[in-house]
Structures are given as structure tokens and as C-alpha cells.
Amino acid sequence: MKTIGNDGWAVEFRRNVHMYCHSLKLSKAGETYDVPCEDSPSGFVLIWPYELKADDTAIQDLLAALREWANQAGIQYRLYTSPTEYETNGPES
């Protein structure tokens, strides 16, 4: 586990636990979220936190932690905020 930022999120990331799927767990204040993610053919790590069962405040906090973690780790991501909307920190392809 790696703690990021001042918000107290702990992140555990293990690559390729099954083919191109990764294990991405974030924990804070006794809550743990297992965030679905996998590699894309274009080199992004696709992350789907909108699928989690959490209230909007928790999701927004989680999104901020995911951005910070990915940027610190040098991971290019496509972070889905809904089934059809996403943001990326790398070049689009």
C-alpha cells in the first residue's frame, strides 16, 4: 500500500492479476474500494470508478485520489466518470 496526498488514501496496485486486468484498491477511513481497471490496446490504463456502489461525494473524492495516484506513478489513464464520459492524462489515440 502507498499513501497518497493529504487526504489519507492508501493505494494498492498490482498489474496483470489476470491477463490485462489489474488489481487497484483504494482505502480510506475504514472503507476499501476495489476499482475495476485494465490495459487498453492504445496503452492507457482504463479505470471505471463510476461502477462502484458509493455516494457522489465518495466518488468525487476517489476520482481526485485516482488522478493524483496515476500522475505520481507516471501512469497514462482513461478515467471513466460515467459509462460514456472519460478524462485522460495522456495523448489521445
Image (spheres, helix red, strand yellow):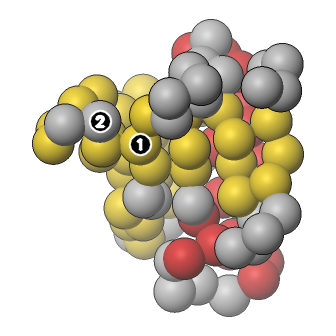
Horizontal and vertical percent position of residue 24: 38, 45
Q: Are marks 2 and 1 in contact (CB under 8 Å)?
A: yes
Query: Position of 81 compared to 33: left or right?
Result: right
Q: Which residue in the structure is indicated by mark 1?
A: 38
Horizontal and vertical percent position of residue 84: 78, 69
Please give the label number shown on residue 20: 2
Horizontal and vertical percent position of residue 39: 44, 34
The quarter of the displayed image where residue 8 is located: top right
Q: Nearer the viewer, residue 71 or 87?
A: 87
Q: Residue type at mark 1: give it.
A: Glu
Residue at x-position 83% and y-position 63%: 85
Q: Residue type at mark 2: give it.
A: Tyr
For residue 89, say whether it is visible: no
Horizontal and vertical percent position of residue 58: 68, 74
Q: Nearer the viewer, residue 33 or 52?
A: 52
Query: Position of 22 compared to 58: left or right?
Result: left
Q: Nearer the viewer, residue 24 or 84?
A: 84
